Protein backbone atom coordinates (compact mmCIF):
# COMPACT_ATOMS: atom_id res chain seq x y z
CA UNK A 1 0.00 0.00 0.00
CA UNK A 2 2.82 2.39 0.87
CA UNK A 3 4.59 1.63 -2.41
CA UNK A 4 1.43 2.42 -4.40
CA UNK A 5 1.00 5.70 -2.53
CA UNK A 6 4.60 6.67 -3.34
CA UNK A 7 4.15 5.69 -7.00
CA UNK A 8 0.99 7.78 -7.24
CA UNK A 9 2.82 10.65 -5.56
CA UNK A 10 5.59 10.49 -8.15
CA UNK A 11 3.05 10.41 -10.99
CA UNK A 12 1.24 13.46 -9.67
CA UNK A 13 4.52 15.23 -8.89
CA UNK A 14 5.93 14.61 -12.38
CA UNK A 15 2.86 15.85 -14.22
CA UNK A 16 2.40 18.70 -11.77
CA UNK A 17 6.01 19.69 -12.46
CA UNK A 18 5.26 19.86 -16.18
CA UNK A 19 2.13 21.85 -15.41
CA UNK A 20 3.96 24.24 -13.10
CA UNK A 21 6.72 24.77 -15.66
CA UNK A 22 4.01 25.63 -18.18
CA UNK A 23 2.58 27.91 -15.50
CA UNK A 24 5.90 29.69 -15.19
CA UNK A 25 5.83 30.14 -18.96
CA UNK A 26 2.33 31.58 -18.65
CA UNK A 27 3.45 34.02 -15.96
CA UNK A 28 6.49 34.98 -18.02
CA UNK A 29 4.22 35.77 -20.96
CA UNK A 30 1.66 37.69 -18.89
CA UNK A 31 4.27 39.73 -17.02
CA UNK A 32 6.22 40.71 -20.13
CA UNK A 33 3.13 41.59 -22.16
CA UNK A 34 1.02 43.33 -19.49
CA UNK A 35 3.47 44.22 -16.68
CA UNK A 36 2.35 44.63 -13.07
CA UNK A 37 -0.30 47.31 -13.37
CA UNK A 38 -4.00 47.99 -13.70
CA UNK A 39 -4.64 45.48 -16.50
CA UNK A 40 -3.11 42.55 -14.61
CA UNK A 41 -4.83 43.63 -11.41
CA UNK A 42 -8.16 43.49 -13.25
CA UNK A 43 -7.42 40.10 -14.83
CA UNK A 44 -6.28 38.43 -11.61
CA UNK A 45 -9.24 39.82 -9.65
CA UNK A 46 -11.76 38.65 -12.28
CA UNK A 47 -10.14 35.21 -12.57
CA UNK A 48 -10.26 34.86 -8.80
CA UNK A 49 -14.05 34.39 -8.92
CA UNK A 50 -14.19 31.04 -10.81
CA UNK A 51 -11.11 29.90 -8.89
CA UNK A 52 -12.90 30.45 -5.57
CA UNK A 53 -15.74 28.18 -6.65
CA UNK A 54 -13.28 25.59 -7.98
CA UNK A 55 -11.61 25.40 -4.58
CA UNK A 56 -14.97 25.25 -2.82
CA UNK A 57 -17.00 22.85 -4.98
CA UNK A 58 -14.47 21.09 -7.17
CA UNK A 59 -11.27 20.45 -5.25
CA UNK A 60 -12.70 21.48 -1.89
CA UNK A 61 -15.70 20.43 0.15
CA UNK A 62 -17.86 18.65 -2.42
CA UNK A 63 -14.88 17.08 -4.18
CA UNK A 64 -13.34 15.78 -0.94
CA UNK A 65 -16.58 14.38 0.50
CA UNK A 66 -17.58 12.89 -2.87
CA UNK A 67 -14.21 11.17 -3.23
CA UNK A 68 -14.47 9.58 0.21
CA UNK A 69 -17.99 8.21 -0.30
CA UNK A 70 -17.33 7.22 -3.92
CA UNK A 71 -14.13 5.36 -2.96
CA UNK A 72 -15.94 3.36 -0.28
CA UNK A 73 -18.88 2.55 -2.59
CA UNK A 74 -16.60 1.54 -5.45
CA UNK A 75 -15.06 -1.05 -3.14
CA UNK A 76 -18.37 -2.45 -1.81
CA UNK A 77 -21.10 -1.51 -4.32
CA UNK A 78 -19.75 -0.41 -7.74
CA UNK A 79 -23.23 -0.07 -9.25
CA UNK A 80 -24.29 2.44 -6.62
CA UNK A 81 -20.95 4.25 -7.03
CA UNK A 82 -21.85 4.77 -10.71
CA UNK A 83 -25.26 6.14 -9.72
CA UNK A 84 -23.66 8.51 -7.20
CA UNK A 85 -21.25 9.79 -9.86
CA UNK A 86 -24.13 10.51 -12.25
CA UNK A 87 -26.19 12.24 -9.58
CA UNK A 88 -23.25 14.38 -8.41
CA UNK A 89 -22.42 15.53 -11.93
CA UNK A 90 -26.08 16.33 -12.64
CA UNK A 91 -26.53 18.35 -9.46
CA UNK A 92 -23.32 20.28 -10.08
CA UNK A 93 -24.39 21.15 -13.62
CA UNK A 94 -27.79 22.36 -12.42
CA UNK A 95 -26.56 24.22 -9.34
CA UNK A 96 -23.46 25.87 -10.74
CA UNK A 97 -25.23 26.59 -14.02
CA UNK A 98 -27.86 28.55 -12.11
CA UNK A 99 -25.18 30.38 -10.11
CA UNK A 100 -23.38 31.27 -13.35
CA UNK A 101 -26.52 32.69 -14.96
CA UNK A 102 -27.31 34.71 -11.83
CA UNK A 103 -23.74 35.98 -11.70
CA UNK A 104 -23.84 37.06 -15.33
CA UNK A 105 -27.07 38.97 -14.66
CA UNK A 106 -25.57 40.77 -11.66
CA UNK A 107 -22.39 41.61 -13.57
CA UNK A 108 -24.46 42.94 -16.49
CA UNK A 109 -26.32 45.27 -14.14
CA UNK A 110 -23.06 46.42 -12.53
CA UNK A 111 -21.50 47.06 -15.94
CA UNK A 112 -24.51 49.09 -17.06
CA UNK A 113 -24.24 51.24 -13.94
CA UNK A 114 -20.71 52.38 -14.83
CA UNK A 115 -19.83 54.97 -17.44
CA UNK A 116 -17.81 52.80 -19.81
CA UNK A 117 -18.02 49.40 -18.13
CA UNK A 118 -15.33 48.38 -15.67
CA UNK A 119 -12.54 46.24 -17.10
CA UNK A 120 -12.77 43.97 -14.05
CA UNK A 121 -16.49 43.44 -14.65
CA UNK A 122 -16.05 42.75 -18.36
CA UNK A 123 -13.34 40.18 -17.68
CA UNK A 124 -15.41 38.56 -14.93
CA UNK A 125 -18.38 38.22 -17.31
CA UNK A 126 -16.18 36.49 -19.86
CA UNK A 127 -14.53 34.07 -17.42
CA UNK A 128 -17.45 33.23 -15.11
CA UNK A 129 -18.62 30.22 -17.23
CA UNK A 130 -15.25 28.63 -16.50
CA UNK A 131 -16.55 28.04 -12.97
CA UNK A 132 -18.94 25.11 -13.67
CA UNK A 133 -16.52 23.65 -16.21
CA UNK A 134 -13.53 23.42 -13.88
CA UNK A 135 -15.67 22.17 -10.98
CA UNK A 136 -16.93 19.31 -13.16
CA UNK A 137 -13.38 18.62 -14.27
CA UNK A 138 -12.32 18.33 -10.62
CA UNK A 139 -15.13 15.86 -9.82
CA UNK A 140 -14.25 13.71 -12.85
CA UNK A 141 -10.62 13.84 -11.75
CA UNK A 142 -11.62 12.61 -8.28
CA UNK A 143 -13.36 9.63 -9.88
CA UNK A 144 -10.24 8.81 -11.87
CA UNK A 145 -8.12 8.95 -8.70
CA UNK A 146 -10.32 6.32 -7.07
CA UNK A 147 -9.74 4.12 -10.11
CA UNK A 148 -5.98 4.60 -9.79
CA UNK A 149 -5.68 7.13 -12.63
CA UNK A 150 -3.85 10.15 -11.20
CA UNK A 151 -2.19 11.36 -14.39
CA UNK A 152 -5.06 13.05 -16.28
CA UNK A 153 -6.16 15.19 -13.35
CA UNK A 154 -2.61 16.31 -12.61
CA UNK A 155 -2.06 17.19 -16.28
CA UNK A 156 -5.29 19.19 -16.70
CA UNK A 157 -3.79 22.61 -15.73
CA UNK A 158 -1.33 22.30 -18.63
CA UNK A 159 -4.21 22.98 -21.03
CA UNK A 160 -5.10 26.27 -19.32
CA UNK A 161 -1.48 27.37 -19.16
CA UNK A 162 -0.91 26.71 -22.87
CA UNK A 163 -4.09 28.60 -23.81
CA UNK A 164 -3.04 31.61 -21.72
CA UNK A 165 0.46 31.58 -23.22
CA UNK A 166 -0.97 31.48 -26.73
CA UNK A 167 -3.48 34.26 -26.09
CA UNK A 168 -1.01 36.57 -24.33
CA UNK A 169 2.31 36.06 -26.14
CA UNK A 170 0.88 34.68 -29.38
CA UNK A 171 -1.57 37.53 -29.92
CA UNK A 172 0.76 40.28 -28.62
CA UNK A 173 1.92 41.38 -32.12
CA UNK A 174 -1.70 42.20 -32.98
CA UNK A 175 -2.06 44.75 -30.17
CA UNK A 176 -0.12 47.87 -29.31
CA UNK A 177 1.06 48.95 -25.87
CA UNK A 178 -1.98 51.23 -25.54
CA UNK A 179 -4.40 48.46 -26.49
CA UNK A 180 -3.69 46.10 -23.60
CA UNK A 181 -7.25 46.29 -22.14
CA UNK A 182 -8.65 44.89 -25.42
CA UNK A 183 -5.86 42.31 -25.63
CA UNK A 184 -6.58 41.01 -22.12
CA UNK A 185 -10.21 40.32 -23.09
CA UNK A 186 -8.90 37.79 -25.62
CA UNK A 187 -6.75 36.29 -22.87
CA UNK A 188 -9.90 35.97 -20.74
CA UNK A 189 -11.72 34.28 -23.63
CA UNK A 190 -8.90 31.73 -23.89
CA UNK A 191 -9.80 30.61 -20.36
CA UNK A 192 -13.20 29.47 -21.65
CA UNK A 193 -11.57 27.63 -24.54
CA UNK A 194 -9.31 25.88 -22.04
CA UNK A 195 -12.29 24.90 -19.89
CA UNK A 196 -14.07 23.27 -22.83
CA UNK A 197 -10.95 21.31 -23.80
CA UNK A 198 -10.33 20.23 -20.19
CA UNK A 199 -13.90 19.02 -19.75
CA UNK A 200 -13.92 17.10 -23.03
CA UNK A 201 -10.56 15.50 -22.24
CA UNK A 202 -11.60 14.30 -18.78
CA UNK A 203 -14.89 12.94 -20.10
CA UNK A 204 -13.07 10.94 -22.79
CA UNK A 205 -10.51 9.55 -20.33
CA UNK A 206 -13.22 8.58 -17.85
CA UNK A 207 -15.04 6.50 -20.47
CA UNK A 208 -12.43 3.80 -20.04
CA UNK A 209 -12.24 3.92 -16.25
CA UNK A 210 -15.38 5.11 -14.51
CA UNK A 211 -19.04 4.31 -15.04
CA UNK A 212 -22.29 6.26 -14.96
CA UNK A 213 -25.87 5.03 -14.52
CA UNK A 214 -29.17 6.60 -15.52
CA UNK A 215 -31.14 5.22 -12.56
CA UNK A 216 -29.92 7.61 -9.85
CA UNK A 217 -32.77 7.21 -7.36
CA UNK A 218 -30.96 4.57 -5.23
CA UNK A 219 -27.98 6.94 -4.93
CA UNK A 220 -29.82 9.64 -2.98
CA UNK A 221 -28.87 8.00 0.31
CA UNK A 222 -25.19 8.19 -0.63
CA UNK A 223 -25.68 11.74 -1.87
CA UNK A 224 -27.06 12.72 1.53
CA UNK A 225 -23.86 11.31 3.07
CA UNK A 226 -21.82 13.45 0.67
CA UNK A 227 -23.81 16.56 1.53
CA UNK A 228 -23.69 15.90 5.29
CA UNK A 229 -19.91 15.62 5.12
CA UNK A 230 -19.63 18.54 2.72
CA UNK A 231 -21.81 20.86 4.80
CA UNK A 232 -19.27 21.74 7.50
CA UNK A 233 -16.51 21.85 4.88
CA UNK A 234 -18.52 24.24 2.70
CA UNK A 235 -19.02 26.48 5.71
CA UNK A 236 -15.34 26.46 6.61
CA UNK A 237 -14.03 26.63 3.06
CA UNK A 238 -16.56 29.34 2.31
CA UNK A 239 -14.99 31.41 5.07
CA UNK A 240 -11.54 30.57 3.70
CA UNK A 241 -12.48 31.63 0.19
CA UNK A 242 -14.09 34.75 1.58
CA UNK A 243 -10.71 35.45 3.14
CA UNK A 244 -9.03 34.97 -0.25
CA UNK A 245 -11.58 37.36 -1.71
CA UNK A 246 -10.86 39.95 0.99
CA UNK A 247 -7.14 39.58 0.30
CA UNK A 248 -7.88 40.32 -3.34
CA UNK A 249 -9.96 43.34 -2.42
CA UNK A 250 -7.22 44.65 -0.13
CA UNK A 251 -4.54 44.24 -2.80
CA UNK A 252 -6.63 45.52 -5.73
CA UNK A 253 -8.20 48.46 -3.87
CA UNK A 254 -6.13 51.12 -5.72
CA UNK A 255 -7.27 49.67 -9.06
CA UNK A 256 -10.90 48.87 -8.31
CA UNK A 257 -11.76 51.68 -5.86
CA UNK A 258 -9.16 54.47 -5.80
CA UNK A 259 -5.94 55.80 -4.23
CA UNK A 260 -7.49 56.90 -0.91
CA UNK A 261 -9.60 55.36 1.84
CA UNK A 262 -11.64 57.62 4.15
CA UNK A 263 -9.62 60.55 2.84
CA UNK A 264 -6.27 58.93 3.71
CA UNK A 265 -3.77 57.76 1.10
CA UNK A 266 -4.04 53.99 0.70
CA UNK A 267 -0.76 52.20 1.56
CA UNK A 268 -0.74 49.97 -1.54
CA UNK A 269 -0.18 51.12 -5.11
CA UNK A 270 -1.66 50.03 -8.43
CA UNK A 271 -0.35 46.63 -9.40
CA UNK A 272 -0.32 45.30 -5.83
CA UNK A 273 -2.66 42.42 -6.69
CA UNK A 274 -0.55 41.51 -9.73
CA UNK A 275 2.61 41.57 -7.59
CA UNK A 276 1.04 39.36 -4.91
CA UNK A 277 -0.41 37.00 -7.53
CA UNK A 278 2.92 36.56 -9.31
CA UNK A 279 4.63 35.85 -5.96
CA UNK A 280 1.94 33.30 -5.13
CA UNK A 281 2.55 31.51 -8.43
CA UNK A 282 6.25 31.18 -7.61
CA UNK A 283 5.86 29.78 -4.09
CA UNK A 284 3.10 27.48 -5.31
CA UNK A 285 5.58 25.83 -7.68
CA UNK A 286 7.31 23.69 -5.01
CA UNK A 287 4.06 23.47 -3.04
CA UNK A 288 2.13 22.13 -6.02
CA UNK A 289 4.88 19.84 -7.28
CA UNK A 290 5.49 18.18 -3.92
CA UNK A 291 3.20 19.20 -1.06
CA UNK A 292 -0.11 19.07 -2.91
CA UNK A 293 1.12 16.06 -4.92
CA UNK A 294 1.59 14.10 -1.69
CA UNK A 295 -1.79 15.24 -0.37
CA UNK A 296 -3.53 14.37 -3.65
CA UNK A 297 -1.98 10.90 -3.79
CA UNK A 298 -2.51 10.13 -0.12
CA UNK A 299 -6.20 11.04 0.09
CA UNK A 300 -7.77 8.07 -1.77
CA UNK A 301 -5.46 5.69 0.12
CA UNK A 302 -6.41 7.18 3.48
CA UNK A 303 -10.10 7.10 2.53
CA UNK A 304 -9.86 3.36 1.80
CA UNK A 305 -7.95 2.72 5.05
CA UNK A 306 -10.17 4.83 7.31
CA UNK A 307 -11.32 1.70 9.20
CA UNK A 308 -7.80 0.24 9.51
CA UNK A 309 -6.22 2.47 12.15
CA UNK A 310 -2.74 0.94 11.98
CA UNK A 311 -2.46 1.11 8.19
CA UNK A 312 -3.99 4.60 8.22
CA UNK A 313 -1.39 5.79 10.74
CA UNK A 314 1.48 4.21 8.79
CA UNK A 315 0.52 5.97 5.56
CA UNK A 316 -0.04 9.29 7.33
CA UNK A 317 3.37 9.07 9.01
CA UNK A 318 4.98 8.43 5.63
CA UNK A 319 3.19 11.41 4.15
CA UNK A 320 4.28 13.61 7.05
CA UNK A 321 7.92 12.59 6.72
CA UNK A 322 7.81 13.12 2.97
CA UNK A 323 6.33 16.64 3.04
CA UNK A 324 8.80 17.71 5.73
CA UNK A 325 11.71 16.23 3.78
CA UNK A 326 10.69 18.25 0.74
CA UNK A 327 9.04 21.29 2.33
CA UNK A 328 11.73 22.46 4.76
CA UNK A 329 14.54 22.67 2.16
CA UNK A 330 12.07 24.17 -0.34
CA UNK A 331 11.20 26.98 2.08
CA UNK A 332 14.83 27.88 2.71
CA UNK A 333 15.88 27.46 -0.90
CA UNK A 334 13.06 29.57 -2.30
CA UNK A 335 13.87 32.41 0.08
CA UNK A 336 17.53 32.35 -1.00
CA UNK A 337 17.06 32.14 -4.78
CA UNK A 338 13.76 34.06 -4.92
CA UNK A 339 15.16 37.32 -6.32
CA UNK A 340 17.03 35.45 -9.07
CA UNK A 341 13.95 33.38 -9.86
CA UNK A 342 11.80 36.49 -10.21
CA UNK A 343 14.29 38.10 -12.58
CA UNK A 344 14.57 34.99 -14.74
CA UNK A 345 10.85 34.23 -14.96
CA UNK A 346 9.11 37.59 -14.88
CA UNK A 347 11.42 40.50 -15.70
CA UNK A 348 11.39 41.90 -19.22
CA UNK A 349 9.09 43.77 -21.59
CA UNK A 350 6.48 45.69 -19.61
CA UNK A 351 7.74 44.15 -16.34
CA UNK A 352 10.64 46.25 -15.04
CA UNK A 353 13.27 45.87 -12.33
CA UNK A 354 11.14 47.76 -9.81
CA UNK A 355 8.28 45.30 -10.38
CA UNK A 356 10.70 42.40 -9.90
CA UNK A 357 11.90 43.85 -6.59
CA UNK A 358 8.32 44.15 -5.36
CA UNK A 359 7.55 40.52 -6.23
CA UNK A 360 10.77 39.25 -4.63
CA UNK A 361 9.99 41.14 -1.42
CA UNK A 362 6.55 39.51 -1.24
CA UNK A 363 8.02 36.09 -2.09
CA UNK A 364 10.21 36.17 1.03
CA UNK A 365 7.07 36.05 3.15
CA UNK A 366 5.36 33.23 1.29
CA UNK A 367 8.51 31.10 1.09
CA UNK A 368 8.86 30.96 4.88
CA UNK A 369 5.95 28.55 5.18
CA UNK A 370 6.06 26.23 2.14
CA UNK A 371 6.52 23.31 4.54
CA UNK A 372 3.54 24.45 6.63
CA UNK A 373 1.23 24.75 3.61
CA UNK A 374 2.17 21.16 2.71
CA UNK A 375 1.43 19.87 6.22
CA UNK A 376 -1.96 21.60 6.16
CA UNK A 377 -2.93 19.95 2.87
CA UNK A 378 -1.96 16.47 4.09
CA UNK A 379 -3.56 16.68 7.53
CA UNK A 380 -6.73 18.35 6.31
CA UNK A 381 -7.24 15.47 3.91
CA UNK A 382 -6.45 13.00 6.70
CA UNK A 383 -9.26 14.45 8.80
CA UNK A 384 -11.58 14.34 5.79
CA UNK A 385 -10.66 10.70 5.17
CA UNK A 386 -11.69 9.91 8.75
CA UNK A 387 -15.04 11.56 8.13
CA UNK A 388 -14.15 14.51 10.37
CA UNK A 389 -14.74 17.70 8.43
CA UNK A 390 -15.44 19.86 11.47
CA UNK A 391 -11.99 19.87 13.09
CA UNK A 392 -10.00 21.38 10.20
CA UNK A 393 -12.87 23.78 9.50
CA UNK A 394 -12.88 25.12 13.07
CA UNK A 395 -9.12 25.64 12.96
CA UNK A 396 -9.34 27.31 9.55
CA UNK A 397 -12.08 29.71 10.64
CA UNK A 398 -9.98 30.94 13.57
CA UNK A 399 -6.94 31.38 11.33
CA UNK A 400 -8.98 33.30 8.76
CA UNK A 401 -9.96 35.83 11.41
CA UNK A 402 -6.35 36.17 12.57
CA UNK A 403 -5.15 36.46 8.98
CA UNK A 404 -7.62 39.22 8.14
CA UNK A 405 -6.61 41.27 11.19
CA UNK A 406 -2.92 40.84 10.37
CA UNK A 407 -3.51 41.74 6.71
CA UNK A 408 -5.28 44.97 7.57
CA UNK A 409 -2.50 45.84 10.02
CA UNK A 410 0.67 44.85 8.18
CA UNK A 411 -0.12 46.63 4.89
CA UNK A 412 0.19 49.93 6.78
CA UNK A 413 3.76 49.08 7.81
CA UNK A 414 6.86 49.15 5.63
CA UNK A 415 5.94 45.66 4.41
CA UNK A 416 3.12 47.07 2.22
CA UNK A 417 1.78 44.22 0.02
CA UNK A 418 4.37 41.86 1.51
CA UNK A 419 2.32 42.12 4.70
CA UNK A 420 -0.28 39.90 3.03
CA UNK A 421 2.39 37.24 2.48
CA UNK A 422 3.83 37.36 6.00
CA UNK A 423 0.34 37.22 7.48
CA UNK A 424 -0.45 34.14 5.39
CA UNK A 425 2.83 32.48 6.38
CA UNK A 426 2.34 33.13 10.10
CA UNK A 427 -1.19 31.71 10.03
CA UNK A 428 -0.06 28.69 7.99
CA UNK A 429 2.60 27.79 10.54
CA UNK A 430 0.13 28.20 13.39
CA UNK A 431 -2.52 26.18 11.56
CA UNK A 432 -0.12 23.32 10.78
CA UNK A 433 0.96 23.10 14.42
CA UNK A 434 -2.64 23.05 15.66
CA UNK A 435 -3.66 20.39 13.12
CA UNK A 436 -0.70 18.24 14.15
CA UNK A 437 -1.63 18.57 17.81
CA UNK A 438 -5.27 17.67 17.13
CA UNK A 439 -4.29 14.73 14.93
CA UNK A 440 -2.24 13.31 17.80
CA UNK A 441 -5.50 12.85 19.70
CA UNK A 442 -6.76 10.63 16.87
CA UNK A 443 -3.44 9.01 15.95
CA UNK A 444 -1.37 9.19 19.17
CA UNK A 445 1.88 8.00 17.62
CA UNK A 446 1.74 10.29 14.57
CA UNK A 447 4.83 12.15 15.81
CA UNK A 448 6.57 9.01 17.02
CA UNK A 449 10.28 8.37 17.01
CA UNK A 450 10.50 7.81 13.25
CA UNK A 451 8.81 11.11 12.34
CA UNK A 452 10.74 13.04 14.98
CA UNK A 453 14.08 11.58 13.87
CA UNK A 454 13.28 12.24 10.21
CA UNK A 455 12.26 15.82 10.98
CA UNK A 456 15.46 16.47 12.93
CA UNK A 457 17.62 15.11 10.12
CA UNK A 458 15.70 17.15 7.55
CA UNK A 459 16.13 20.31 9.62
CA UNK A 460 19.89 19.69 9.81
CA UNK A 461 20.04 19.12 6.05
CA UNK A 462 18.10 22.34 5.50
CA UNK A 463 20.59 24.36 7.55
CA UNK A 464 23.51 22.80 5.66
CA UNK A 465 21.81 23.42 2.32
CA UNK A 466 21.03 27.04 3.19
CA UNK A 467 24.64 27.66 4.18
CA UNK A 468 25.96 26.09 0.99
CA UNK A 469 23.57 28.01 -1.26
CA UNK A 470 24.18 31.32 0.52
CA UNK A 471 27.94 30.79 0.24
CA UNK A 472 27.65 29.94 -3.45
CA UNK A 473 25.62 33.06 -4.18
CA UNK A 474 28.09 35.20 -2.23
CA UNK A 475 31.18 34.04 -4.14
CA UNK A 476 29.61 34.20 -7.60
CA UNK A 477 29.87 37.52 -9.47
CA UNK A 478 26.87 39.82 -9.74
CA UNK A 479 24.53 38.85 -12.56
CA UNK A 480 23.76 41.63 -15.03
CA UNK A 481 22.25 39.93 -18.07
CA UNK A 482 19.41 37.41 -18.18
CA UNK A 483 21.78 34.57 -19.10
CA UNK A 484 24.10 35.39 -16.20
CA UNK A 485 21.14 35.43 -13.82
CA UNK A 486 19.96 32.09 -15.18
CA UNK A 487 23.39 30.51 -14.72
CA UNK A 488 23.66 31.82 -11.16
CA UNK A 489 20.19 30.48 -10.37
CA UNK A 490 20.92 27.04 -11.82
CA UNK A 491 24.22 26.75 -9.96
CA UNK A 492 22.55 27.66 -6.67
CA UNK A 493 19.73 25.17 -7.23
CA UNK A 494 22.13 22.36 -8.17
CA UNK A 495 24.27 23.03 -5.10
CA UNK A 496 21.19 22.92 -2.89
CA UNK A 497 19.94 19.68 -4.42
CA UNK A 498 23.34 18.02 -4.12
CA UNK A 499 23.66 18.95 -0.46
CA UNK A 500 20.19 17.66 0.40
CA UNK A 501 20.45 14.49 -1.68
CA UNK A 502 24.01 13.76 -0.60
CA UNK A 503 23.23 14.41 3.04
CA UNK A 504 20.11 12.25 2.92
CA UNK A 505 22.13 9.43 1.39
CA UNK A 506 24.82 9.70 4.06
CA UNK A 507 22.17 9.71 6.77
CA UNK A 508 20.43 6.76 5.07
CA UNK A 509 17.09 8.54 4.98
CA UNK A 510 14.45 6.44 3.18
CA UNK A 511 12.63 9.63 2.16
CA UNK A 512 15.17 10.09 -0.62
CA UNK A 513 14.27 6.68 -2.04
CA UNK A 514 10.58 7.49 -1.75
CA UNK A 515 11.08 10.64 -3.82
CA UNK A 516 13.21 9.12 -6.59
CA UNK A 517 11.34 5.81 -6.64
CA UNK A 518 14.15 3.41 -5.84
CA UNK A 519 13.76 0.52 -3.46
Image (tube, grey):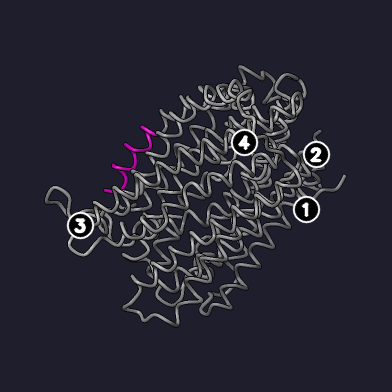
* Residue 502 disc label: 1
Q: Residue at x 48, y 59 (%)?
A: 192
Residue found at the very far front of the displayed protein: 215
- Mark 1 and mark 4: Cα distance apart in space: 50 Å
Identify which residue, 4 or 428, lies in the foreground.
4
Residue 419 is at least partly visible in this image: yes
Quadrant of residue 255 in the image? Answer: bottom left
Q: Residue 435, how many percent across, how many down?
A: 55, 27
Residue found at the very far right of the displayed protein: 519
Disc 4 crowd rating (10 Å Cα; few below 14, some 14-19, many 20+) is some
Say left or right for 177 vs 293: left
**Residue range corresponding to the magenta coloring:** 400-413
Q: Residue at x 54, y 24 (%)?
A: 229
Q: Residue 313, how many percent across, how many down?
A: 72, 24
Identify the residue position indicated by label 3 in the image: 258
Identify the residue position indicated by label 4 in the image: 86
* Residue 4 disc label: 2
Q: Nearer the viewer, mark 1 or mark 4?
A: 4
Residue 450 is at least partly visible in this image: no
- Label located before the other in sequence (1 or 3): 3
- Mark 1 and mark 3: Cα distance apart in space: 53 Å
Say left or right for 121 vs 292: left
- Mark 2 and mark 3: Cα distance apart in space: 53 Å
- Label located before the other in sequence (1 or 2): 2
- Mark 3 and mark 4: Cα distance apart in space: 47 Å
- Label located before the other in sequence (3 or 4): 4
Amino acid sequence: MGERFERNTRTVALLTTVSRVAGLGRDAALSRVFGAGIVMDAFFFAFMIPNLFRRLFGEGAVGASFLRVYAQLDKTDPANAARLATLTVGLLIAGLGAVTLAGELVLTLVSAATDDGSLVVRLAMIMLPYMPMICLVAILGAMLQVHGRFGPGAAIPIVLNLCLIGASAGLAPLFGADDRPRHVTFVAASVIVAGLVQLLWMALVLRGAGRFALDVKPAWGSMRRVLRQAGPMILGLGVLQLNVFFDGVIASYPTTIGPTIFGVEYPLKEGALAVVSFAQRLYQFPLGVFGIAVATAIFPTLARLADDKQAFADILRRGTRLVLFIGLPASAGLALVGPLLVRVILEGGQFGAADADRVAFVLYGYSAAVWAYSIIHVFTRAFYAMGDAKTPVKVAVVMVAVNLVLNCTLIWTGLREAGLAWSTAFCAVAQSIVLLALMRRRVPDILGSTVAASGAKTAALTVAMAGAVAGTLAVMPDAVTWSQTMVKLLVAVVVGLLVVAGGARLLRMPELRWVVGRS
